[in-house]
Image (spheres, rainbow, N blue to C red):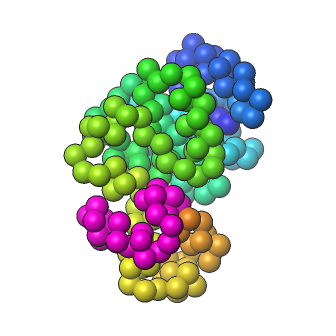
């Protein structure tokens, strides 16, 4: 796991808490987006835990870059900012979850594990601020593209060709869509997409 925050004391505190868990290990820290991307260029990280507002490149831009360059890395936001605009921007950029810094440490541990497993997490306060069903905020732009092609009846191979990505990547996107929308199959995902205004 990589911890990204411009406050050293916050990074130290998070590392201490996370490293207390047998199955969680902080392998790096970064004070900003540029440093985080440099770390990711030389080592594989399963989860990036990041703040949103930092000097230089902002958190949303960092999330977008990670989503594009390191598709095997999931992002969990941990911040003090909880406006609907910021939540939606982070989730659309590819964040898997969004927590506030007043989150209890056990909740943080559970969210990190969920993020690592590709499951979405929103803190209750954040979820309550969304004006539309949270499922609509939990899909990235690419996942919405995939869902639209699923709704059009395209196979994984056809979706891969249309989006110029690998078929395995499409399968991963579909699995994430099912998880985020809390449904068990493609038909139910399409129904949820229409119900939440995604389609």
Q: Is residue 187 within the magenta segment? A: yes
Q: Residue at x 58, y 44 (%)?
A: 114
Q: Position of residue 175 (x, y in %)?
A: 56, 65
Q: Hey, which residue is sitting farthest top in the picture? A: 9
Classify residue 143 by image quadrant: bottom left
Asked whether, in this view, residue 138 is left or right of residue 70, the answer is: left
User: In the rendered image, which quarter contains the N terminus?
Assistant: top right
The vertical placement of 167 against 131, above or below, is below
Asked whether, in this view, residue 12 is left or right of residue 164, the answer is: right
Badge count: 0
Using the image as rendered, state which of residue 163 and residue 87 is in the foreground. Answer: 87
Using the image as rendered, state which of residue 1 and residue 97 is in the foreground. Answer: 97
Asked whether, in this view, residue 6 is left or right of residue 196, the answer is: right
Q: Position of residue 186 (x, y in %)?
A: 47, 74
Judge whether residue 125 can be spotted in this image. yes
User: In the rendered image, which quarter contains the C terminus?
Assistant: bottom left
Asked whether, in this view, residue 14 is left or right of residue 76, the answer is: right
Q: Position of residue 171 (x, y in %)?
A: 59, 71
Q: Residue at x 37, y 54 (%)?
A: 135
Judge whether residue 57 can be spotted in this image. no
Q: Is residue 23 within the magenta segment? A: no
Q: Hey, which residue is sitting farthest right in the picture? A: 22
SS majority, magenta: helix
Q: Residue at x 68, y 18 (%)?
A: 16
The vertical placement of 136 against 164, above or below, is above
Q: Which residues are magenta?
A: 176-199
Q: Position of residue 119 (x, y in %)?
A: 54, 50
The vertical placement of 179 against 83, above or below, is below
The vertical placement of 8 against 170, above or below, is above
Q: Residue at x 55, y 81 (%)?
A: 156
């Amino acid at each position: 796991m990589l911890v990204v925050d411009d406050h050293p004391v916050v990074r130290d505190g998070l590392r201490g808490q996370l490293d207390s868990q047998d199955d969680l290990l902080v392998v790096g820290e970064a004070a900003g987006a540029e440093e985080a991307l440099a770390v990711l260029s030389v080592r594989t990280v399963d989860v990036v835990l990041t703040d949103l507002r930092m000097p230089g490149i902002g958190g949303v831009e960092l999330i977008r870059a990670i989503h594009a360059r390191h598709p095997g890395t999931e992002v969990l936001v941990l911040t003090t900012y909880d406006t609907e605009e910021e939540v939606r921007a982070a989730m659309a950029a590819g964040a898997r979850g969004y927590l506030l810094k007043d989150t209890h440490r056990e909740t943080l541990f559970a969210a990190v594990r969920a993020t690592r497993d590709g499951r979405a997490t929103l803190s209750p306060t954040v979820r309550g601020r969304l004006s539309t069903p949270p499922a609509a905020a939990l899909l990235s732009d690419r996942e919405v593209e995939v869902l639209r092609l699923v709704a059009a009846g395209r196979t994984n191979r056809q979706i891969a060709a249309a989006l110029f990505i690998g078929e395995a990547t499409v399968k991963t996107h579909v699995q994430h869509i099912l998880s985020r929308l809390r449904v068990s199959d493609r038909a139910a995902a399409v129904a949820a997409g229409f119900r939440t205004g995604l389609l």
